Amino acid sequence: MLHLLKRLPVAIAFLALTSCYQAGRPVAGVADAPPWFSLNFDEMLHEGDAAPEALSFCAVPQCPKPLVIGTLLVTGESADQLEAMLRHPERLAAELKRRAREPTLKRAAKPGTKQHIATATTVTPLQDGPAPGFTLTMARKEGKGRINATVLGWRDDEALHVVIAIGDDAEAVTESATRAAVSNKKSRQSGG
């Protein structure tokens, strides 16, 4: 009985979210059926030069390798900056390493104090494949809290199309991002 009570807040949150859930367009290359879900976007989420297009996720317990994957359309100066990062991710790696040395606010610390949280970050370029990009792995130095991301992007006439996948399993994340990039490029070339 106690194990059911521990899950009650999660069940209530899930019911609250799903009661107002409105399915959105799935990321191309991702299943449009459970255990995958897609969120609907409206224009309120458009931020400067970047606009989300689609977001799909697969969560525990239905997914053995949970992840979230999204697509963005980026224009203007932001597209130029992001494209440079996709082609030269070593710049991102250097910036993340610099920031990792800075003290940051930590929830458990006294209010107003800063504490160093040691993290290990690895950025690996991905130049072979459907689009240039990189993989990113971040974890605390003691090995806890490992997260993996793959970011791929390609240009068309006026915009940079970006696929971002984030999850626990590095191989599943990169495979999903690659599949989505291939599907999105094909869909755009065929006018879909």
Image: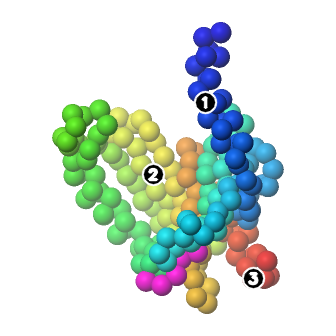
Q: Which of disc 3 and disc 1 is earlier in sequence?
A: 1
Disc sitting over residue 189 in the figure: 3
Residue hosting label 2: 137
The vertical placement of 81 against 164, above or below, is: below
Magenta residues (range): 73-77
- Check disc 2 and give the amino acid type: Thr
Residue hosting label 1: 10
Which mark lies nearer to you, 3 or 2?
3
Q: Which of disc 2 and disc 3 is earlier in sequence?
A: 2
Whether the magenta-drawn stretch holds residue 40 is answered as: no
- Point 42% across, 59% down: residue: 123
**Residue 157 in the figure: left or right of residue 116:** right
**Distance (Cα) linking label 1 and label 3:** 42 Å
- Check disc 1 and give the amino acid type: Val
- Check disc 3 and give the amino acid type: Gln
Q: Do the residues labelled 1 and 3 touch (CB within 8 Å)?
A: no
Q: Which of 17 and 67 is in front in this view?
A: 17
Answer with the quarter of the image where residue 183 lies. Answer: bottom right
Which mark lies nearer to you, 2 or 1?
1
Q: Nearer the viewer, residue 24 or 80?
A: 24
Q: Position of residue 53 (x, y in %)?
A: 64, 68
